[in-house]
Image (cartoon, helix red, strand yellow):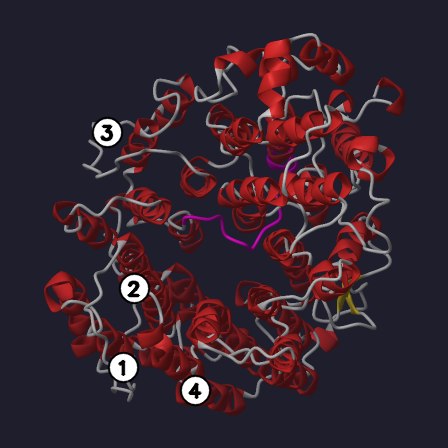
């Protein structure tokens, strides 16, 4: 009976995902309002709005009262038209009502009034109505100038409404018969932000079709897209094309490269060029460049360079930052690096993003109270909190165990501060906390802040409260984005550990409203990789007392889950095995990434290195992929080196594993606790408790505090060596490194102590598969999540375009 019920649950999710395959739900070519015939041979991405003229962009929600969806700045004389659009009246009726009203005809004949109306609607919670007004004005015979379309695109870009922006650019060509350099640049910006790199690479072709010459901003947008896509060859071609077009690299070019290049890792040449360009930049741009350089230095653990960069600011305004970094430099003994600094005519003042960067650094250092205290020092300076600052505060509060303080803070800037959704999130966790004072002049909730709230809630309460967060986003006219879906997949992959099929079902069901990305596939492939490792590699707790450890090539034959593809991008050459039942479901997602020409990023290449080195013990192939990473301009991090260490350790070549750790240290990457835990676990599989203890002592001597996995690995070494009593006493002694040992376990056996010890982790131990009741719970939460998403944001047949005859 239980098996039939489980099968029914799985079939329901599979059937639901089959109905919601990733495909465009709106075809602009079929509709006369969005015809593409005036743009010959130019590919148009299918990201146009899913709601035609006369349709409201938000679904009606019976749970909440109707909301005022148009801003109060709308002139009274045109309010009936907006109300008709909100009421989803047929466009023909809206046109007849305008033509029958002399007042409305007079309003639309005045281009200045129409443009003000368009700007107000483009900044409203329903910007699709600005597109509808543009079409209505055109049908009334009052076609506006191109600067009106450009102004609408400006406001749409500010609110990141890229789907509407695409349609506005397209309508300008249809209405006027031509386009402009600014409009095509706005289109290029939207293509870059939506990661449609294949269309972005063809933007110069669109300029030629329009008989226009691209300007330097066009090449800068293309360059930014290439860098974001980890396409260094494309970036070089873009710089070459810019030079051939007569635009030499200037200060703005170097500032742009420094801002986008951070994802590749710290690069001294990029830093020198950016610093040399500072005197020629505007003060606001100077702060952005310096902030990016500081963030890159902090992420590379280059604290000495951070101190030097801080000297570009006014000394009195950054004293707290200098004290903070100096204490860490003295404690860890970093050697200074020579950085040539330019003399600026004005001392820079740190802004809110500067504080957010150092707050995030404190959070990474586990100093959560220090992160909150750092922002409190900014309040007297009257620096207003930005979404980055609020997101950092939310993260710090949740990690402190004061999540309700973060929830109250967000409720204070929400459009519905007394919503019962906030009370539901705080239920059971109220400890009388008070929110900190925030200097926010114009509070506004953003998707980034909601994602920070989602991250904290997932860590504290799991998937159950996600529908309440969706409701909060809906009430504040926000929508989930790629990062929202990434957080959900990441939590399920690391905390819930479902089967890969469940992650794919969640991904595919949310794809009609969220474009897939390489970051989403990271978690799918990581989940499959973990399952395959369980099949072929045992931990030391399962190592037989006699004989050597069971290695990959000594296990009986089983089907491999991850194969190698004939192409490297976008999954670093990884392909799902053809025998997997869910491989067909992943094909549309992978096909979409390939169509967008998405390149493999460092995280995906890490998974490939780990697959080759750990699961197949093919170190030569892993090193070849490692060299590809470096050849593409990406800097390897501790995870790439750690995968090589794990591969050598599993094969028993501990000398080479130590050499890799030494090479990482020479590259400026300090061996972390994951590398040492890998070595300890490998010694444990070989039942070498002495070598495991020696590696553990080296880790402690290096200033790395033991965590639960490292202690678990060390204790398993003594258990595998048949020294169970020693393992028990060792666990009792090392328990105090995490928290005081509970008196109730003084007489407990090793198995009971291990069960309680592993429960101290924020996430569940990854040694066991979920049982059927646990899987039922995950299926239930996923179904509730999908229903809530469909209720607030998801498409339905009511949202699809109506027939052409109605128009």
Judged from the image, the secondary structure of the residue bearing numbered disc 1 is loop
* Residue 671 location, quadrant: bottom left
Q: Which residue is mark 3?
A: 431
Q: Is residue 723 magenta?
A: no
Q: Earlier in the sequence, mark 2 or mark 1?
A: 2
Residue 244 in percent (x, y) is at: 65, 82
Between label 4 and label 2, give the one nearer the viewer.
2
Magenta-drawn segment: 762-777
The correct choice, above or below, for 441 with respect to 335 in the image is above
Which of 386 and 666 lies nearest the eye of the viewer?
A: 386
Picture quarter with the C terminus: top right
Q: Which disc, if any, is residue 283?
A: 2
Q: Would residue 643 be found to the left or right of residue 26 on screen?
A: left
Label 2 packing within 10 angstroms: few (<14), some (14-19), many (20+): some
Q: Earlier in the sequence, mark 4 or mark 1?
A: 1
Q: Which residue is mark 4?
A: 667
Q: Which residue is mark 1?
A: 342
Residue 481 in percent (x, y) is at: 57, 42
Distance from disc 2 to disc 1, alpha carbons, whole Å, reads: 14 Å
């Amino acid at each position: 009976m239980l098996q039939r019920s489980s099968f029914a649950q799985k079939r329901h999710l599979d059937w639901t995902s089959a109905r919601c395959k990733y495909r465009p739900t709106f075809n602009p070519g079929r509709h006369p309002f969005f015809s593409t015939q005036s743009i010959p041979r130019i590919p148009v991405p299918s990201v146009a709005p899913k709601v035609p003229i006369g349709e409201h962009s938000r679904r009606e929600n019976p749970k909440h009262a109707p909301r005022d969806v148009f801003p109060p700045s709308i002139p009274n004389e045109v309010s009936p038209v907006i109300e008709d659009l909100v009421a989803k009246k047929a466009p023909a009726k809206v046109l007849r009502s305008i033509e029958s009203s002399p007042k409305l005809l007079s309003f639309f004949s005045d281009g200045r009034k129409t443009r003000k109306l368009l700007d107000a609607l483009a900044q409203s919670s329903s910007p699709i109505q600005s597109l509808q007004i543009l079409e209505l004005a055109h049908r009334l015979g009052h076609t506006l100038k191109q600067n009106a379309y450009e102004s609408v695109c400006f406001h749409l870009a500010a609110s990141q409404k890229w789907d509407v922006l695409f349609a506005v650019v397209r309508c300008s060509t249809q209405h006027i018969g031509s386009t402009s350099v600014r409009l095509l640049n706005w289109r290029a910006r939207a293509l870059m932000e939506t990661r449609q790199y294949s269309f972005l690479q063809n933007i110069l072709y669109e300029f030629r079709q329009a008989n226009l010459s691209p300007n330097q901003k066009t090449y800068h947008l293309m360059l930014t897209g290439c860098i974001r896509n980890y396409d260094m060859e494309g970036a070089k071609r873009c710089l070459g094309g810019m030079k051939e077009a007569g635009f030499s690299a200037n200060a703005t070019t170097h500032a742009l490269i420094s801002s986008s290049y951070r994802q590749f890792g710290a690069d001294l040449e990029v830093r020198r060029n950016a610093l040399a360009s500072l005197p020629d930049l505007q003060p606001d741009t100077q702060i952005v460049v310096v902030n990016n350089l500081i963030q890159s230095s902090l992420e590379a653990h280059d604290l000495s360079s951070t101190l030097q960069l801080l000297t570009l600011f006014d000394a009195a305004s950054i004293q707290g930052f200098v004290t903070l970094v100096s204490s860490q430099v003295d404690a860890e003994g970093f050697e200074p690096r020579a950085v040539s600094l330019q003399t600026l005519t004005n001392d820079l003042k740190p802004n809110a993003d500067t504080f957010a960067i150092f707050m995030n650094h404190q959070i990474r250092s586990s100093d959560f109270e220090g992160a909150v205290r750092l922002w409190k020092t900014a309040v007297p300076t009257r620096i207003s909190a930005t979404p980055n600052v609020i997101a950092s505060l939310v993260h710090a509060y949740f990690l402190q165990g004061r999540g309700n303080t973060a929830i109250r803070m967000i409720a204070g800037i929400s459009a519905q501060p007394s919503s019962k959704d906030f009370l539901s999130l705080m239920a059971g966790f109220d400890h009388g906390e008070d929110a900190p004072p925030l200097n926010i002049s114009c509070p506004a909730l953003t998707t980034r802040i909601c994602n920070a709230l989602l991250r904290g809630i997932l860590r504290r309460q799991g998937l159950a409260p996600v529908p309440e967060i969706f409701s909060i986003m809906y009430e504040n006219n926000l929508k989930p984005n790629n990062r929202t879906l990434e957080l959900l997949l990441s939590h399920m992959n690391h905390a819930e550990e479902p089967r890969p099929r469940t992650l794919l079902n969640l991904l595919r069901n949310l794809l009609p409203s969220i474009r897939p990305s390489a970051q989403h596939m990271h978690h799918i492939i990581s989940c499959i990789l973990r399952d395959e490792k369980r099949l072929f590699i045992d931990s030391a707790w399962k190592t037989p007392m006699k004989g050597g450890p069971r290695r990959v090539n000594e296990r009986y034959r089983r089907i491999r889950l991850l194969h190698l593809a004939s192409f490297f991008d976008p999954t670093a050459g990884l392909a799902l095995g053809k025998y997997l039942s869910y491989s067909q479901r992943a094909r549309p997602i992978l096909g979409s990434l390939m169509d967008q020409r998405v390149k493999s990023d460092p995280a995906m290449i890490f998974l490939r290195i780990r697959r080759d080195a750990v699961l197949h013990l093919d170190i030569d192939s892993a090193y070849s992929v490692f060299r590809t990473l470096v050849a593409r301009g990406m800097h390897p991090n501790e995870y790439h080196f750690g995968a090589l260490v794990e591969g050598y350790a599993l094969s028993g070549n501990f000398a080479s594993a130590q050499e890799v750790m030494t090479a990482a240290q020479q590259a400026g990457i300090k061996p972390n606790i994951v590398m040492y835990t890998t070595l300890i676990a490998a010694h444990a599989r070989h039942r070498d408790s002495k070598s495991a203890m020696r590696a553990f002592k080296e880790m402690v001597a290096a200033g790395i505090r033991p965590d639960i996995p490292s202690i678990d690995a060390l204790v398993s070494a003594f258990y595998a060596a048949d020294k169970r009593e020693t393992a028990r006493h060792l666990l009792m002694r090392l328990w105090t490194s995490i928290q005081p040992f509970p008196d109730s376990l003084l007489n407990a056996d090793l198995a009971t102590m291990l069960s309680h010890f592993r429960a101290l982790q924020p996430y569940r131990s990854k040694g066991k598969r979920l049982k059927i009741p646990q899987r039922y719970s995950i299926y239930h939460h996923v179904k509730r999540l999908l229903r809530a998403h469909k209720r607030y944001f998801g498409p339905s047949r009511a949202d699809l375009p109506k027939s052409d005859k109605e128009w």
